[in-house]
Image: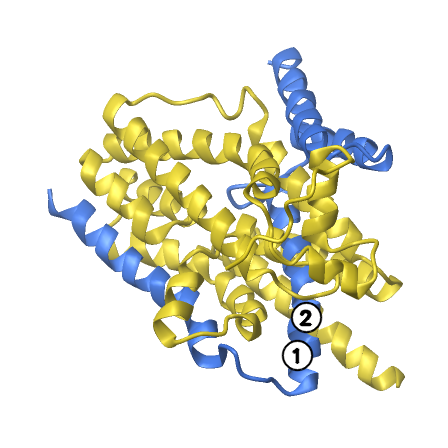
Chain colours: A yellow, B blue
Amino acid sequence: MSDQSARIPRRPLGRQALRVCTGGGGARHEQSQHMERSWSMVGSLLLPLLIPIVAFGLSFGTLAAEAGFSPAAATIMSATTFAGGAQFAAIAVLLQGGNVLIAAAAACLLNMRFVPMGLAISPYLTGGPLSRLLHAQLIIDETWALSHRNDGTYSIDVLRRLGISLWFCWVSATLVGALFEASIDIVALGLDAALPAVFLALLVPRLRTKVHVAAAGGAATITLLLVPVVPPGIPILVGGVIAAVATQQRQRHAT
Amino acid sequence: MDDPIAVLAVTGIGTVVIKAAGPLLLGGSEMHPKARALIDMMAPCLLAALIAVLVFTREVEVVVDERSAGIAAGIVAMILRANILIVAGLAAITTALLRAWFS
């Protein structure tokens, strides 16, 4: 696997990395030169995600310890599940006295959005079943969103590198949180707003046409309408899929 | 205590299956163009849905709170073409400041 992007970036690294990652503003062949990411590029994308991931990881470790998890158990859960929302949901159920099955079900419901995400990325996962299985485990909101280029393709290289880095940070933070019951105050620091800001910065370049804007708006609306009425995790899945299907249906009737 | 191990195991297995479902069933193979177009459209839709939940919900309630202002600050930064670190940082700082002032 050769590393082609040994050039020195002339623009601010962050914006360059974002352009590279989202594949914007260049001809196709220029984009193919950016196919392989250097670690420094992945690194600059890592930073705005690193702080929330570490903060949430510490928080999860602490919470899991409260719920009776040993540091080893908490760490293994983070290592195998690697999905913050689901992990928190499971712990919350346990802390409220719910049983194991309900906790696991809540977690899996929240993870359902990974099904369409996995479907979206699967054409780019070439390789044997084991390779695909392992790469799929690296899919979380952040890695899925950042590996998605503006032109609709996915960079499995970014998925792998960012995924492994974030996974490592997530697991380490969990361990530290569980061992020392130390956490960063996510709410006080406003970190829960940093993550959607990153996703929004990734979404906007992809809203290339009015159709895309309408689809995104529709998805957000349907999702918010569903939040009070269905269990957590379902709104995103249903809202996202319905909006996409509705948009495609209208496209077909228009042509 | 058995509960943590059980939760860890069931959740872990469930998550592995959920994440691997798409790639194992479809990985590397060519999809029908219409299916492909649909799945491509799912990306901005899922992202928008995710953002909506992260900004406008708390548990099972739809709320407008300091995060909305934080995101608005982030949007201003995006219009000014700030890099993603600044966008995220501004959103966080704005939210944190509002929370500090109003509590």
Return the residue at label 1.
Answer: B36
| Chain of the residue on which disc 1 is drawn | B
Give, as a three-letter code, the residue at label 2: Asp
Q: Residue at 18% x, 35% y: name it.
A: A70
In the visual, does A79 lie left or right of B79?
left
In the visual, does A100 lie left or right of B61?
left
Q: Position of residue B59 (x, y in %)?
A: 51, 42
Work out whether residue A227 or residue B14 is closer to the camera in this orientation and state it.
Answer: B14
Q: Position of residue B92 (x, y in %)?
A: 64, 26
Give, as a three-letter code, the residue at label 1: Arg
Q: Residues within 10 Å of mark 1 (few under 14, many from 20)?
A: some
| Chain of the residue on which disc 2 is drawn | B
In the visual, does A216 lie left or right of A130?
right
From what the image shows, is residue B47 above or below residue B77?
Answer: below
Q: Residues within 10 Å of mark 2 (few under 14, many from 20)?
A: many
- The reply to whether discs 1 and 2 touch (Cβ–Cβ < 8 Å) is yes
The N terminus of chain B, quarter of image:
top left
Work out whether residue A232 or residue A118 is closer to the camera in this orientation and state it.
Answer: A118
Q: Taking the image as drawn, is residue A88 in sight? A: yes
Co-location on one chain, circles 1 and 2: yes
Q: Position of residue A112 (x, y in %)?
A: 47, 63
Disc 2 on helix, strand or loop?
helix
Q: Residue at 20% x, 45% y: name it.
A: B4
Q: Which mark is residue B40?
A: 2
In the visual, does A206 lie left or right of A148?
right
The C terminus of chain B, quarter of image:
top right
Q: Residue at 54% x, 83% y: name it.
A: B29
Q: Which quadrant of the view contains residue A92?
A: top left
From what the image shows, is residue A168 above or below residue B94?
Answer: below
